[in-house]
Amino acid sequence: MTQVITPLMSSETGILIGLLAPLLVGLVTPLLAVRSLWRDAAGPLGAVVTFVAALHVAGAVLAGETPRLVLLEFADGLRFEFAVTPLGAVFGLVASGLWIAAGLFSVGYMRGNHEKHQTRFAAFYAVAVHAALAIAWSGNLLVLFVFYEILTFSTFPLVTHKESKAARDAGRLYMSILVGTSVVLLLPAVIYVWVKTGTLDFVPGGILAGYVAPEVVPWLLACFAFGTGKAALMPFHRWLPAAMVAPTPVSALLHAVAVVKAGVFTMLTVIVYVFGIDFLAESSGSDWLVWLASFTILASSFVAISKDDLKARLAYSTISQLSYIVLGAAIATSIAAQGAALHIVMHAAGKITLFFCAGAIYVRAHLTKISELDGQGREMPLVFIAFFLGALSIIGIPPLGGSWSKFYLMLGAMERDLVLVLAVLGLSSLLNIYYLLEPVQRAFFRPKTRQVEVTSQPLTVIPPVATAILSVLLFFFVDQIDALAKLVAG
Amino acid sequence: MSIYTLFNNLPALLVVVPLLLSPIATLIPSGRLAWVIALLGTGVSVIAAMLLCSVTASGIRITYFLGNWPPPWGIEFVVDGATSLTAMVMATLAFLATLFAGRALAAEIAAKDVGKAYAAWLLACGGLYGLVMTADAFNLFVFLEISALASVILIALGAGQDRRALIAAYNYLVIGAVGATFYVIGVGFIYAVTGSLNMADLAQRIPDVEAGSIIYVGFGFMVAGMLVKAAVFPVHIWLPAAYSYAPAAVSTLLAAIATKAAIYVLARIIFTVFGGVPEVTALALEWVVVPLSIAGIFLGTIMAIYERDLKKMLAFSSIAQIGYITLGMGIATGAGIAAGFIHIGNHALIKGGLFMAVGGIFLATGARVSVDSMAGIGRKMPVTAAAFLICGLSLIGLPLTAGFISKLYLVRALLDNDNLLIVGLVLASSALSVVYLWKIVEVMWVRSARVDAMEISERPALYIPLWLVAISNIWLGLDAGWLVGAAEAAAASLLGAGG
């Protein structure tokens, strides 16, 4: 091996910086409470640093390395270790990159809305991002589980931010589903893997083959699938609409990107690196999951149609889209896994745009219902154009990024002759068109029904426009990410 | 005097120093000075326990003849991995509780009683250490009575704040006496057929005894007595009132160490004394200890969920947590017993810290702490509330805390045995424990303080012991290697001594 260039930092330092930067932001924010300008600058600055670190780590992964950082040994050969898989590199890029936009948006939203406790909010926001990155780069199942729980607990103060009764109730539902499923199902599944195989490391091709009998596989997979409540697989999806009571920056970054993607990331990681796609396909252990994911895709789409509250509709749309990723994992072919990995990126960019827009509409005009949006397009043209692009990407129409992931998912379904799944994907796209484009259609083509005073809040408009453009760019410049996604399935 | 002579006297020092300092404490008029003496007594015990640990870590088994009378006539202390680990956990927590008592106890009881309180305190500690160290079945009964009577005094001291402490102390006295009597009846049966009281000696003689039914009866009485002392469901009824009406410092001490000694003795009886007759012990483990543990885990948790008084809630939670420990020991594999020992240490830290925090809040508010009176405490007393949160997260077993390590090893031991159903039950109850704990967290931070609670302020004097415990909860969650290793060695020495 020859050293090609002396890099700016080793990939180990990259991991360290990427993990420490958000944590540091979380820790210094309370100290900067009196200087609100510095406090608010800390988030976006930390986001840029984290993103650069994540780019560096992803570059190393693309070059064929496995960046690794061992912190300490718990006990008995259980290492507290970070080791970046291609999938982890992708998720790390998504979480840190979108944090830049969300950090800016968050400042605009919280200030424009005159929210209370902005310091506490900013601190826990950064800690949650830290936990998401730690999940992305975790080196084994135990570390992943550790930060999975920390992510739940660190987002609780954000969900209950308003301290109202509705917020408290939502917080209870949030905690009980996420903590309950993870403790009762995910933890024993993790320990079962540990007892049976003696390791918890992520190994390409999986670790279970030869240790676990094929008839156990569906049950073990069920423990993982339902234990990962963050993936919002029905019937454990209720926490996500409930969490919409949080301020929109939380819904945007955490409940459209970091938290929910941590869930599907866990599913995908477990299927690819613990079960192994081939072992899963041979044992047909994931067939039931294909149908449950399909059911979730359609059922939550129908619920979404019935919701007039914009954020609630987006939440159900998220539940539907998350199941695309679970579906890709459950189909258990390398193309489908590649599609699932890509969909983490594409859906993140699209959905965060939609939430940014919902937040911008709320801050600027104080509208929350879709039926109130009639004719508002002319008041806020940029916001609704951004919404339009984000929606198109989620529907999967070229030239937007979302078309790639749907394409791969369909190819994967074809490979396994799952014609019904193809029909589900097609029908879902039609439903998406209906319920995601309705707000845009109302805003631009319906006469105005109510006069509202629209204030100017540039920091809430720039981020959605930027992520909408990102969604377009992701169609044309997909090759690097596609290369990473291809590495996922080996 | 060689260094070995010193080590060989350590087992006695650990027990005798607190016992000897106790009468001195009664003679001292100044409460402050009595506290210093209590610190000295518990401090010496910590050092002795640590030294014992370092000796047994290298696999040495220490035997010590009190007054140089060899067994089976004299009383023998035996220290192996299991003894030293339990003694170490208890001594450390007792020392921290003493540190906490400095301000807390003086604030709750009359000044003239403080010296006597520390005398009872030292007696209780010495008695509990004696329980763990002794290798003589009858001498164990003596220590049992010493610690029980001293604990009764300590609980009754709560009467200055709440008269119900007297009833709690009386109940503890009566039920504790029943437990101790059961134990001594069992010892009588066994003595009648073996003619010995020394545990190692008994372990050798019991398998050869012809009258098998007497062994069953004796074993049954001994185990039943110890189940009462360990507050295993459903013979736990003395515990909630005793813990909740005692003064804050006493609750901390008792919650951290009292039942641990009884659990240790239970394990000794089952795995060492009766280790040679597995057909007898398996019966008790499978049909009594494991089912009762699971019932205790569930009912303790459910009662905690419905309890509004905070100290009682923690006491009910203790019953559930004791269930985890006895469940681990009950499955009787090396991994299971090790998981039990891990949780002996971790639960002492968790409950000690929680009772300290609630004690601090009680001293600040001046009223019994209920769920409602915790409203807004997160902002009024941030340092205490943060420590409560850390210990609470450890209680529910959040990763990176000591409680997670306990859960991890317990579930692993159960899965090793393919006890899938029990795993499900354990984890379901563990998820339920989030309910009562998180209710408090929500009240502390998400609800605003009551109007009459405006003058509440922090009690910095209590920070040091509280945060030592809180930090240990995180430290043992990150670096569990030492505790896990010691617990595995403890399990090995328990099983090895019997087999």
Image: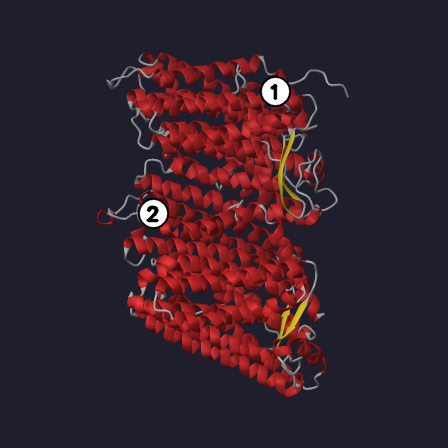
- Relative to B81, say whether A85 is above or below: above
- Relative to B493, say whether A43 is above or below: above
Give the quarter of the figure containing the C terminus of chain A: top right
Which residue is denoted by mark 2 in the rendering? B443
Does residue B441 appear in this view? yes
Q: Amino acid at mark 1?
A: Ile
- Relative to A293, say whether B170 is above or below: below
* Camera-side residue of A385 and B422: B422
Colour treatment of the image:
secondary structure
Separation of residues labelled 2 and 1 (CA atoms): 45 Å
Q: Residue at x 65, y 86 (%)?
A: B195
The chain holding disc 2 is B
Report the label total. 2
- Relative to B453, say whether A17 is above or below: above
Mark 1 lies on a secondary structure that is: helix
Q: Which dot marks residue A157?
A: none
The chain holding disc 1 is A
Q: Amino acid at mark 2?
A: Val
Residue A5 percent location from the top left of the image = 69, 15
Mark 2 lies on a secondary structure that is: helix
* Camera-side residue of B168 and B10: B10
Q: Residue at x 69, y 69 (%)?
A: B497
* Camera-side residue of B491 and B5: B5
Does residue B230 appear in this view? no
Crowding at mark 1 (Cα within 10 Å: few <14, some 14-19, many 20+): many
Residue A21 percent location from the top left of the image = 51, 27
Which residue is denoted by mark 1 in the rendering? A481
Q: Residue at x 43, y 73 (%)?
A: B23
Residue A209 percent location from the top left of the image = 73, 42
Crowding at mark 2 (Cα within 10 Å: few <14, some 14-19, many 20+): many
The answer to whether residue B295 is left or right of residue A490 is left
Residue A407 percent location from the top left of the image = 60, 21
